Image: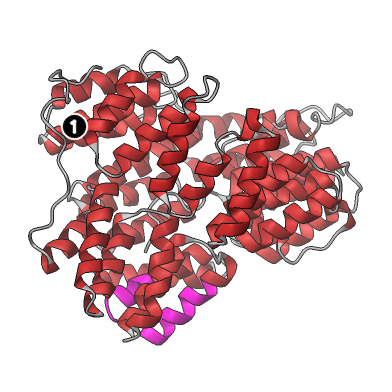
Amino acid sequence: MIVTACHIPMPRTPLVLLSLLCGSLAAAATAPRGGSADAAVMAAEMALQRGDCRSGSQDYAAAMRDSSDLQLAARAAEVALECGQYAIGEQIGARWRVLAGADAQAAIALVRAQLGQAHIAEARRTFADWLNQSPNDTAVAGALQVIAAGAGNEAALAMLRDLQHARLSGGHVQLQLAQIAADGWDFAQAIRYAAAATKAGADATEARALTMRARAGLGDADAALSDARALASTAAETQGLAVPEALLWLGRDAEAETELLKLREQPALRPVADRRLALLAFARSDYGTAEQRFSGLLRDRDSAAIAVYYLAIIAERRGDSESALRGYELLANTAFDGAARRRVAGIYLHDGERAQATSLLTPDDDANIAARLAAALSVADLLSSGGAPQDAVAQLDSALQNYPGHPEINYQRAVYLERVDADAAIKALDTLAHQRPADMNVANALGFTLADHNRELPRAEQLVRSALRAQPDNPAILDSLGWVLFRRGQAQVALPYLQRAFRLYHDGDIGAHCGEVLWKLGRQKEARAMWQLALAADPESTTLAATAHRYAPDLAAPKPPAVRADGQGTAI
């Protein structure tokens, strides 16, 4: 499958704030700005105000040529990275490194600019050069955390995979490496890092928790559950839910629910156990139970926002837009604000109020670069999922005027273009693959798209296998390989990849593919069960609905009851 979420995460941590992790900005005397540097900064900020990211980045780069101000360097690098102008960011980062020497922030900026261009080897050399300057373990772990947050765990792991350095051997650093590997979909590597972390004296509980998750992801049930039970008995305060969490990773949801029901008898664990139970009921479309459980969480301060959010989705799926909108409105200025806005926009679009839908996702005039970019991507996703992929492509064409060459926009544009013109989408992805040969998300997207349209199947398999070598446990890539193999007439070989992908990620597209392969193998009863499970987990997937209807027209996504079991409407 193609990953339609941002596969290169937007920068989350402004460089000027990284002193919390990597040491303060060097306060050594720097030459004051003046003359042409000040003029260039002013021009840059004016360009950014009108949304012109390329000019803003170029003007900041020009300012850097005439200045040795480290704070200016931090701002210049921040702008270039958030604008996705990674080649310019590399110039700025290189200049900053010359000025700042061993400063962590300068090295991080340069590494992120190189990873943004998928220049993995160059980023590895830059990071190794900084390690040679003997930063302490805390600084190294902090740098790794920031790089992974800014460039993505997958890119960070690609950089680190062939890097051997003494500065990476500390327990705290190995623990951070284990986290990056687990989040970057390489569970075996995560286990190796966690073992090294424990040996080097890192927190044994954190290392074991990562090991448990990785073993469960690999399907090693006995080892994962052994780890989980040990965690639950020795670190109950922080790992009390380890056993049900392991069972969920193993795809044993019914057993996980049984364990959660036991744990909710412990007062300290009851709220979090109740949240998990409510989410489990929602995921299987048991809306009556989910509604009851979420309603019971409304009085818990830590659970209220998530309860309101899911109660609103249930109301929306029931067709009660008024209650849904009321619930989403309550989530303003909470952690669910963005997700709620997206749901409200979807309701408006469904009702034919397109202008109101898109305006809801439009940022304020004073929004920062990252917020504007995220809004452009969000509007495009809304239009595409609302049945207007051509308009989504046009939205991203417009965004590229302000963020020219931005890899994430180009990637998303190709994804939406596939729903309009497959030949054009394949051409766009092919161009990206040649520009970014080390970007395995692009390789996966191109391989999957070729297979989905029965084009160049041997090449499609080669592309997807190369991506899977880099991210061996990524469910999206496992699904792609299964689908390529199915298209090549190897349904029996394809099935285990698809089944594992669905266990790791209950996505509608994966469920659609897995069910179709089962059906073609003559296992219709299992195919229907797979589609029913997938429809419950992802009832809004158009691919799943179309596939299930083609083979089993009587199957349909479950609908929430009109009212709760107690006869009352949704309490929001």
Label 1 SS: helix
Residue 351: x, y in percent?
10, 34
**Would residue 82 be seen by someone viewing this image from the given angle?**
yes
Drawn side of residue 458 relative to residue 489, left or right: right
- The residue at 55%/55% (across/down) is 216
Drawn side of residue 84 relative to residue 445, left or right: right
| Residue 284 image-quadrant placement | top left
| Residue 454 image-quadrant placement | bottom left
Task: Give the quarter of the figure containing the C terminus.
Answer: top left
Query: Residue 292: within the magenta?
Result: no
Residue 57: x, y in percent?
57, 42
- The residue at 29%/67% (across/down) is 513
- The residue at 39%/19% (across/down) is 304
Q: Is the magenta stretch mostly helix, strand or loop?
A: helix
Residue 556: x, y in percent?
13, 52
**Would residue 96 be seen by someone viewing this image from the given angle?**
no
Q: Does residue 528 lie above or below 363 as drawn?
A: below
- The residue at 86%/59% (across/down) is 165
The residue carrying mark 1 is 316
| Nearest the eye: 373 or 260 | 260
Query: Residue 465: within the magenta?
Result: yes
| Nearest the eye: 153 or 489 | 489
Q: Does residue 277 lie above or below 399 as drawn?
A: above
| Nearest the eye: 238 or 32 | 238
Badge 1 local density, few (<14 within 10 Å), some, or many (20+)? many
Q: Report the magenta residues as a range.
A: 445-467
Task: Give the quarter of the figure containing the N terminus.
Answer: bottom left
How many discs appear? 1
The amino acid beneath tag 1 is Glu
Residue 87: x, y in percent?
61, 55
Q: Does residue 486 lie above or below 413 as drawn?
A: below
| Residue 505 image-quadrant placement | bottom left
